[in-house]
């Protein structure tokens, strides 16, 4: 896709004051020379996030998240580096242009940019039509939507015409072919005509707020009730979630509610339940589940109460659970969808059923019991076997006992018999898994990741290097950047040493602009956070340098030992002897540290 010129990135960073940007997501209060706020990246009771206007950095003392303004946007909006730079560029009116390095990729991006433009123009056209036509506007008002909500979601109306949108966009300079590629026209032989006619229009936004497609709803009983945009270069079905761009504003919510339809989603938002998204009328896909998990692991499913909605719920549970989400099910009375429920009973009643949402296991047991006569021996056995299969997926023995006891009370079947059945199912699964693991030579080990001592040493040495010139001069005379082990700290060391040696003044952003990965940005940002380590500075510096040098020597000893073994097997005495000499020197060096 090309490279963004360094001077453009610098200009965008300089034009976006970190305090102003973070204040759009998190309320900040002045504290000393900086600001403090509640960290949006963990369940902060805080405030524990510090924001420095002077350094143009943020740092959370709770979860360790750190970075400059680009790093913050990457995290809060879940964007990659270029997307975050583009977001901040748009914020201050700086157009992000890349130096082309792949002509095909550049052409592809230019096409997408043009389709985004066309979609925006179409949305404006539909929006204007809505307020110029009484019937569709009254339809929405009669659905209890207010003007503010209509504007927030950019709702519109497609005229009952074969070519009104086509004419409008041609006047704007867009060709029939491009408008067709945007999914807004249909084609018959060589003629183009408007795809959406006499429908309420719902612009579909991606997570960055760009219009990528549309949904159109009829105002009567004609079919199809909903008509959605076809797939285009900017709209791929099953990879987006309607309303997600609004659900994550101004900050990412702790949990997300997923509903089926456009109106369900809009109704929830209008009534203050803004952590809701919709699955765009499709069954939950793996891509949508992964997208949801990027923003929250706690997901509430609230599909319609009809048979199709409940079947979609079961599919959604499997997919969401497979990507590691914690799923709860909101139970709506039969025959209702969220929009109908709120219009009938009010939002407070809806909030009650959210509070009464049930875990996945309870929902599966409820569905297993549905339609079964527990007085019938066969149906009772089927139900108990289903429950045993469901709870066998649990790891917590107390939970298993509780569900088994409850099922025993309901059915009169001895709890030990139910637990025996659970154990048999578990043993069968373990046997299958063991066999699969043996066949695949897979060994799974649960490990706790602890930061290596050398990584802490690298971080602290770089902290001292930017604190003052005396520390830097002392460090430079004892270690060079190539001795750093962690790749991004080695890169940071080279940048910092170069600037310090030339006597250049630099800011954290002068270093951070060369790092594009979230983890790297976190690590390198922490260099500029004062952790209060001030006692016996030079002794501490010596200890950190020893730690790094020791690891480097040990790594080299391991390499040489392997090489000696190889040369001995090959009977290459000369090379083996030379390495043996080096090995002796290294071991002596190690004991001297």
Image: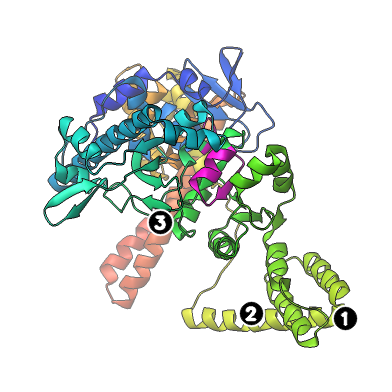
Please tell me which residue is depicted at 64% across the width and 79% down the height of the picture: 430
| Residue beneath the point at 49% across and 45% down | 262
Q: Which residue is mark 2?
A: 430
Local packing at callout 3 (Cα closer than 10 Å; few below 14, some 14-19, many 20+) is few
The colouring scheme, among rainbow, by chain, secondary structure or one colour, is: rainbow
Q: CA distance from mark 2 to mark 3?
A: 50 Å
Give the structural element (helix, strand or loop) at label 2: helix
Magenta-drawn segment: 247-268
| Picture residue at 80% right of the left edge, 84% below the top | 376
Of 325 and 120, the residue lying toward us: 120
Picture coordinates of residue 252, whole percent (x, y): 55, 37
The mark closer to the camera, 2 or 3, is: 3
Disc 3 is placed on an element classified as loop
Outermost residue, left side: 190
As for residue 256 lying within the magenta part, the answer is yes
Residue that numbered label 1 is attached to: 414
Q: Which residue is mark 3?
A: 223
């Amino acid at each position: 896709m090309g490279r963004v010129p360094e001077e453009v990135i610098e200009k965008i960073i300089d034009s976006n004051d970190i305090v102003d940007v973070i204040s759009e997501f998190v309320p900040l209060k002045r504290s000393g020379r900086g600001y403090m706020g509640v960290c949006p990246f963990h369940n902060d009771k805080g405030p524990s996030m510090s924001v420095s206007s002077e350094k143009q950095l943020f740092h959370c003392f709770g979860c360790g998240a750190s970075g400059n303004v680009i790093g913050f946007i990457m995290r809060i909006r879940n964007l990659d580096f270029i997307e975050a730079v583009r977001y901040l560029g748009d914020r201050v009116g700086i157009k992000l242009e890349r130096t082309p390095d792949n002509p095909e990729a550049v052409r592809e991006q230019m096409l997408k940019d043009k389709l985004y433009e066309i979609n925006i123009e179409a949305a404006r056209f539909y929006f204007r039509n809505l307020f110029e036509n009484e019937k569709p506007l009254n339809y929405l008002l009669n659905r209890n939507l207010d003007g503010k909500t209509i504007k927030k979601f950019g709702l519109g109306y497609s005229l009952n015409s074969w070519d009104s949108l086509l004419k409008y966009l041609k006047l704007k300079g867009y060709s029939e072919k491009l408008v067709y590629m945007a999914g807004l026209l249909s084609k018959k032989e060589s003629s183009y005509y408007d795809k959406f006619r006499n429908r309420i229009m719902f612009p579909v936004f991606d997570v960055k707020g760009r219009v990528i497609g549309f949904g159109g709803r009829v105002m009567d009983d004609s079919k199809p009730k909903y008509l959605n945009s076809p797939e285009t270069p900017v709209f791929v079905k099953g990879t987006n979630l309607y309303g997600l761009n609004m659900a994550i504003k101004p900050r990412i919510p702790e949990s997300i509610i997923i509903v089926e339809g456009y109106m369900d989603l809009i109704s929830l938002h209008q009534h203050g339940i803004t952590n809701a998204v919709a699955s765009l009328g499709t069954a939950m896909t793996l891509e949508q589940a992964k997208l949801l998990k990027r923003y929250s692991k706690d997901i509430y499913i609230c599909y319609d109460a009809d048979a199709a909605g409940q079947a979609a719920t079961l599919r959604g549970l499997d997919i969401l659970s497979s990507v590691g989400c914690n799923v709860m099910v909101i139970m709506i009375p039969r025959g209702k969808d969220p929009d109908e429920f709120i219009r009938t009973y009010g939002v407070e009643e809806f909030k009650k059923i959210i509070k009464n949402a049930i875990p996945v296991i309870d929902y599966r047991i409820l569905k297993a019991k549905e339609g079964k006569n527990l007085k019938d021996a066969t149906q009772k056995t089927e139900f108990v076997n289903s429950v045993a299969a469901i709870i066998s997926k649990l790891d917590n023995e107390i939970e298993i006992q509780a569900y088994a006891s409850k099922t025993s009370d309901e059915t009169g079947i001895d709890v030990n018999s139910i637990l025996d059945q659970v154990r048999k199912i578990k043993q069968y699964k373990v046997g299958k898994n063991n066999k699969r693991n043996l066949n695949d030579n897979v060994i799974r080990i649960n490990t706790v990741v602890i930061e290596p001592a050398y990584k802490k040493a690298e971080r602290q040495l770089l902290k001292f290097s930017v604190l003052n010139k005396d520390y830097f001069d002392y460090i430079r005379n004892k270690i060079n950047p190539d001795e750093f082990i962690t790749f991004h700290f080695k890169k940071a060391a080279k940048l910092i040493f170069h600037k310090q040696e030339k006597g250049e003044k630099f800011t954290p952003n002068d270093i951070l602009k060369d790092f594009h990965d979230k983890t790297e940005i976190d690590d390198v940002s922490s260099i500029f956070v004062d952790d209060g380590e001030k006692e016996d500075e030079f002794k501490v510096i010596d200890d950190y340098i020893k730690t790094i040098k020791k690891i480097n020597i040990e790594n080299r000893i391991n390499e040489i030992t392997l090489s000696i073994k190889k040369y001995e097997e090959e009977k290459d005495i000369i090379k083996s002897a030379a390495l043996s000499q080096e090995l002796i020197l290294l071991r002596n060096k190690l004991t001297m540290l």
